[in-house]
Image (spheres, rainbow, N blue to C red):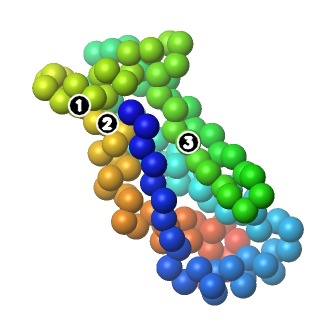
């Protein structure tokens, strides 16, 4: 079930210049915006997750990590409470009354093309950088 989304922020040079005005706080500003947008994606994915598997919908967890010049966000699904998450996600031939297969992948695929701009907008909004 591993999936990755890489993106670029349009207008990044202007945004970067404004973020430098925040001083040493800018990486935290980017991390906060990334976390907020990833949590919004998590909510969409949860709505798409098949309901009949009980703990699966409650097993989502989002985390960010900051290392040097890299900030990442990860959505975890499954874990000890729902070790069957990957099987439910990948079995496209199974019908579900509520939710469906590829619940996380389909969510990421829909935002992939615009995610960078969305993060940029969130940073600008959070820090009045318009």
Between tags 3 and 2, which lies in front? Answer: 3
Q: Secondary structure at mark 3?
A: strand
Task: Classify residue 105 by image quadrant.
Answer: top left
Q: Secondary structure at mark 1?
A: loop
Q: Which mark is residue 81?
A: none
**Residue tagged 2:** 103
From the viewer's perspective, is residue 51 above or below residue 130?
A: above
In this view, which residue lies farthest toward the right? Answer: 24
Task: Quote the CA–CA distance across marks 3 and 2.
Answer: 15 Å
Residue 54 visible in this rendered orientation of the protein: yes
Where the N terminus falls, by quadrant? top left
Left or right of 120 on screen, residue 126: right
**Residue tagged 3:** 74
Nearer the N terminus, badge 3 or badge 2?
A: 3
**Residue tagged 1:** 100
Nearer the N terminus, badge 1 or badge 3?
A: 3
Asked whether the residues under the numbered discs 1 and 2 touch, taking CB atoms below 8 Å apart as contact, a structural biologist would say yes
Measured as percent of width and height from the top left, residue 30 is found at 67, 63
Where the C terminus falls, by quadrant? bottom right
From the viewer's perspective, is residue 125 above or below residue 56?
A: below
Residue 99 visible in this rendered orientation of the protein: no
């Amino acid at each position: 079930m591993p999936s990755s989304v890489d993106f670029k922020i349009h207008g990044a040079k202007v945004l970067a210049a404004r973020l430098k005005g925040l001083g040493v706080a800018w990486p935290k500003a980017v991390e906060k915006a990334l976390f907020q947008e990833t949590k919004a994606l998590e909510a969409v994915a949860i709505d798409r997750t098949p309901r009949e598997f009980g703990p699966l919908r409650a097993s989502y967890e989002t985390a960010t990590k900051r290392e040097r010049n890299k900030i990442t966000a990860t959505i975890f699904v499954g874990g000890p409470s729902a070790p069957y998450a990957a099987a439910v996600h990948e079995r496209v031939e199974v019908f579900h009354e509520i939710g469906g297969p590829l619940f996380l992948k389909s969510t990421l695929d829909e935002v992939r093309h615009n995610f960078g701009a969305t993060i940029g907008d969130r940073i600008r909004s959070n820090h009045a950088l318009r």
